[in-house]
Image (tube, rainbow, N blue to C red):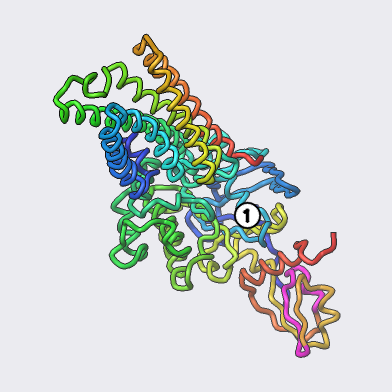
Amino acid sequence: MRKKIKSYLVFTSLWYRFGVYLAIPAVLAAIGLLIERGLPGGGLIVISVLLPVAEIISDSWLFGGIQTKDSMKLEYLKTSGQGKELIRTALWTDLFRKLLSAIVIMALFSLAMVMGKGEAPEAAGTGGFGSLLYLVLLSWLVSVLGTFVSRYASLVWINLIVSYGAMVLAMLGIFLLRLAEHILLIDLLFAIFGILMSTVAVKAAVERVERSYHDE
Amino acid sequence: MSKKDVKTTKEIQFNDKTDRPGQTAQMWQKALQAWNLKKNFKGFQLSVPGLELPKGFATALIGENGAGKTTLLNILTGIRLDYKGEISYFGRQEKGIDASVQERIGYTGPGSYFLPQWTIRQVEEISGLLFDNFHKDRYRALCEELGIGGSGTDVSKQVKSLSDGNRMKLMLAAVLARDTSLLILDEPASPLDPLMRDRLCDMIRNYLDQGGGEKTVFFSTHNIADMESVTDYAIILEHGNIVEEGFVEELKEKYICVKGEAADAERAGEAMFSMHRSAYGFEGICLARNLERLAGMDITLETPTLSQIAVAVMKANTNLGKKA
């Protein structure tokens, strides 16, 4: 596990770590709290919509453009027999980190709401476990889908457009939450779809790296 | 004026595998052999019917821009896999490159080698992940010794903030911190200052000496004069083909530097391999076997430098300035 985390961290700069582990969660929590004041129960929803935006944009500085034809050549990694596996591990760990971020940020925010208001989760406006899990998985799923699409471009403005699309998708998902009856079942479907989407995303990036061993 | 016949490189024999040329007895061992290497790319064709790197020596790959040096090195290091032909490393029966072979090869190259956002510390971390034979303490000592990232080595410096020279030093530190059997260095001297080039030659020589005949270096260079002191064997590549190769000492017997009077320039030109003329005389390279054709002329013979030989061979084979 330590090697997996290290494999991932070697691709991240200090600024990226600061942004993803500190700045983004802090900003999202602050926005959530602000929304919560005017619209009780809206804080968590806004976080679940904005988190994919932050993830897609921040991914530009991590694996941005890795699926493009002119992707980073990674020659040093290619001189090692373990290079390709290291990239694969880093990609998987990144997607897992995105899930972990969604869980931690939203769970902590919900906990803060419940503790702050001194009420049960439903009354505190965070919904039950199923709803929280729904928002977490929805946010993660949209992040994975968005980063997968955005990695086909290396331009930040394209990533911005993709992130706006992801935001719309997340809002649609939240609209569905209001209509859904079997939330836990949908959660399960989201989890399965998220894993499948992650597999596709990693496969696409690794295939791009493999193609870079050949002229086109 | 007569010179003894020059043997072909394949005939050279040595006393011991670690000895330098000209001392006899057993055929040199090969660190790498390749057969019928072919690669086509956008109108360019690399075509190498046979390539052999003598084990325990430093081999220079020389050629003009676009000759195919980087393509060849990329194929040998496994960075390019779209080629035809076979390569055998370290005398193995199995052909081609795999993880165990890559573990034994240290490669430095131009372009996108390290990710720009990596720091000196991250290069250490990733090298530890990529190669089982990487030694962190050796890497740190080399970074310090080479003054990468300033005195005291600021390990938080990013690759993109390093000068080209320091980036090359970082690559060298990363590959020399490993236990390898073959170094393949693409233009290692180009970004380095003269002092560091001298240091690079020392580092290559130390690497070979420490290997006791088991370690080999293959590097491409345009800085032939700076690298001559460390070059044992030279391969000259022109538009994708090997046009000359051999141990430097043997090449210096095969080619002779000739200087003569202006009055003889016209006649000498017919026998010379490559020649410069001026109002005062001529100077150029002549094949030793053609020296007899200069008989009767007032000429001076000198041993050419590798650089003079390489330039003469490249001139004879270049497409530069020739109409299609």
Residue B300 visible to an observer of this rendering: yes
A176 left or right of B26?
A: left
Provide the residue designation for mark 1.
Answer: B69
Task: Pick the quarter of the image with the N terminus of chain B.
Answer: bottom right
Task: Pick the quarter of the image with the C terminus of chain B.
Answer: bottom right
Classify mark 1: helix, strand or loop. Answer: helix
Instruction: Report which quarter residue B132 is drawn in.
Output: top left
Which of the two residues, B247 or B217, is positioned nearer the viewer here? B217
Instruction: Report which quarter residue B75 is drawn in.
Output: top right
Q: Is residue B293 magenta?
A: yes
Q: Looking at the image, is B80 positioned above or below residue A188? A: below
Q: Residue at x 35, y 20 (%)?
A: A134
**Name of the residue lying farthest toward the left:** A118
Q: Magenta part of the protein: which range?
A: B279-294
Locate residue B310, reporting x and y percent: 66, 66
Locate residue B7, reporting x and y percent: 68, 59
